Image (cartoon, rainbow, N blue to C red):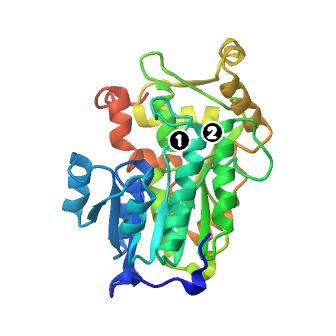
Amino acid sequence: MSDSRTRTSTRRPDAGRTVAVLGATGQQGGAVSAALLTAGWTVRAVVRDPGGSRARSLAAAGAEVVRGDLADPGSLRAAFAGVHGVFSVQPSSGQAGAGLSHDDEVRYGVAVADAAEDSGARHLVYSSMIAAGPVSTGVRHFDVKSRIEEHVRGLGMTTTVVRPATFMELLLTATDPGRGELTFLMRPDQAMQLVAVQDIGRVTAAVLGAPGQFGGRTVEIAGDALTGTEIADRLTRAARRPITYRRLPQALLDQDEVLARSVALVDDGRLAGRADLAGLRAAFPFLLRFDQWLAGPGRAPLLDALGGPPPAGPA
């Protein structure tokens, strides 16, 4: 780890309002970029392919788009030169098709953190996940987040770890409108905390704007807590068609160790979420509840899941 006291600053005059955003063409990085631009920050979107369509869209929205490769620490240091802050998120090693190992994800998360410090950034925000912590979850692609968190906290710079709850967007991928069914991890009567991806961006922007308040902290992010049945009821009203809820079937859990362990983590509370919702709403009053999300930013993905507009009239 470099010594920040002897580091040569490479700041430019706009450094106080510039944030480098990793994963800017993805869900979280895209939400962070949008929130920062809205709040008046200069966004430096760090992407592998500056010529790609999503990168061009970021540039059109006002971001500065630069090349950076997680496997190339030199490119990260160059991308971070002169910035005030860095938002760090990596592809999940547990995501199908991600093409990286658990050790790869740790190496990339460490590389971003070290490059941020070496480049003279003042504030690093790392996006982890709700079940991370000092006690192993037994799910390797969850536990890699804990390993990155540990490294981040050892840096000689201001850092904040954000731990988003389960994405509201994920529930739509678990919904089958044709069968009228939502299938997920919790029991029908068991509450699980949820967050809109948009709000990860807005919380991150608020955190970067108040380093004295949020530096050195771990912030668990959630905007709502609902049971499986309550989620299905809200989907029924928004979709105007009956949708019921059931937990993932035991036969599937018997065949899939990761899903089985995830269900166990929901039951013990770690994956269900333990964030202080009242405290969060006091600090971040913009946090969306699930029905607000369905009527707002969730409307388009809901229509995609339905395959078109909902039928007229009540469900």
Q: Which residue is drawn at 52% across and 82% down?
A: 7
On-image quarter of the N terminus = bottom right
Q: Which x, y percent locates residue 313?
A: 35, 30
Residue with the mark numbered 2: 141
State the count of labels: 2
Above or below, 205 relative to 267: below
Q: Is residue 259 left or right of residue 195?
A: right
Asked whether the beta carbons under mark 1 and mark 2 sit within 8 Å of each other, the answer is: yes
* Quadrant in the picture for residue 20: bottom left
Q: In this view, does 29 lie to the left or right of 123?
A: left
Between the C-alphas of marks 1 and 2, the distance is: 7 Å
Q: Residue at x 62, y 79 (%)?
A: 213
Above or below, 55 relative to 185: below
Q: Relative to the observer, which residue lies in front, 93 or 75?
A: 75
Q: Which x, y percent locates residue 86?
A: 47, 68
On-image quarter of the C terminus = top left
Q: In this view, does 236 lie to the left or right of 10?
A: right
* Quadrant in the picture for residue 72: bottom left
Q: For the residue marked with disc 2, what is the amino acid?
A: His
Residue with the mark numbered 1: 92
Q: Which x, y percent locates residue 221?
A: 60, 57
Work out whether residue 180 can be spotted.
yes
Q: Point out which mark residue 146 bears.
A: none
Q: In this view, does 188 lie to the left or right of 290?
A: right
Q: Which x, y percent locates residue 30?
A: 37, 54
* Quadrant in the picture for residue 259: top right
Q: For the residue marked with disc 1, what is the amino acid?
A: Ser
Q: Which residue is drawn at 68% across and 68% down?
A: 154
